[in-house]
Amino acid sequence: MNILLVSFEALTGLPELFGYILISIFGAMVGSFLNVVIHRVPNEESIVFPNSACPKCGKSIKPYDNIPILSWLILRGKCRNCKNSISARYPAVELLIATLFVIVYWQIGFSPFLPVCLIFVAAVVALIFIDAENMILPNVITYPLLVFTLLVRLIYPLFFGTEFFSDFKIFPLNFMQDFPGWLVSLAGAVLGGLVGGGSLWLVGEIWKRLRGVDAMGLGDVKMMFAVGALLGWQLTLLSIFLGAFTGAIIGVFLISRQKEKDMQTQIPFGIFLGIGSVISLLFGEQIVKWYLSMFV
Ligand SMILES: [Zn+2]
């Protein structure tokens, strides 16, 4: 993504540090909400009702015990009522989202594209954790994410110009300069979606024909279609590459630790594609520039 830095200080008169503090608090709160999403969406439960409750004793959690990160630390990871331990995943997700939001803010600044990146990161992190626990990427997240990225591709060029999308400057969109921005943008989204989702679908199909097993879930295809629609084909290829790279490293590590050497161990690939997509959103432009500079 291209950076259109608008200083928080210039806009509000408050020190820049305030922006970082606000975004990290906001991130922890979003992380707290994502914990509910990660916990309930795979079970097809409502994410609004009922209020959060202890998974062990079922007692609903009071608002003062539901402060992101802090409550878990104050209660030392135990339920106030039944003293059973509460998974460290909860504060970990809150801390992760707070950290990622700070990095997004640092990279994008106080720009109209900030909410887009925050929503994208939040959705992909939710998918990563759900895939890790349940080996699925639910349609109730991947479909809205795809609709969201397509709407951004359509609406942002109309209101804010095309500066946010890096694929406008590269082949083949650079040949569409005389077309209206929103049309070029949508073409870039479709191309990115095909490169992201289409390539995975093709790999899965070929694998199925050759080996007779479903290696690639359709959830991965849908997620990467949405990722590709926002990032464009170049950063999407980078996402897949980064995902395969981290997946291979962690896969080798897991297999080496396994007692029985069973190579058919299923690895939820969505985790690594998700990690690759977030890295690509945040640092993709820099990585591509650095990579290309090695050949020039
Ligand atoms: Zn309890």
Image (tube, helix red, strand yellow):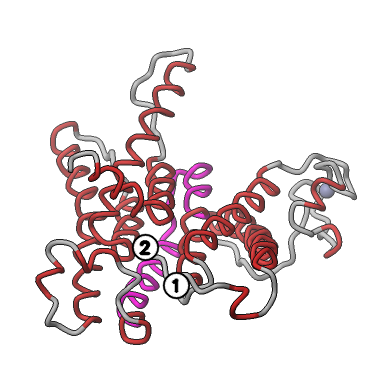
Q: Residues within 10 Å of mark 2 (few under 14, many from 20)?
A: many
State whether residue 203 is above or below residue 62.
above
Viewer-closest of 84 and 69: 69
Closer-to-camera residue (190/136): 190
Q: Which residue is mark 2?
A: 1
Label 1 CB, ligand 1: below 8 Å? Answer: no
Q: Amino acid at mark 1?
A: Phe
- Report the number of discs: 2
Lower sequence index among marks 2 and 1 = 2
Residue 12, image x and y in percent? 65, 80
Kindly report the distance in space between the C-alpha atoms of the residues bearing marks 2 and 1: 9 Å
Is 294 placed above or below 11 here?
Answer: above
| Picture coordinates of residue 239, whole percent (x, y) | 33, 48
Element assignment for label 2: loop
Q: Which residues are magenta?
A: 126-155
Q: Secondary structure at mark 1?
A: loop
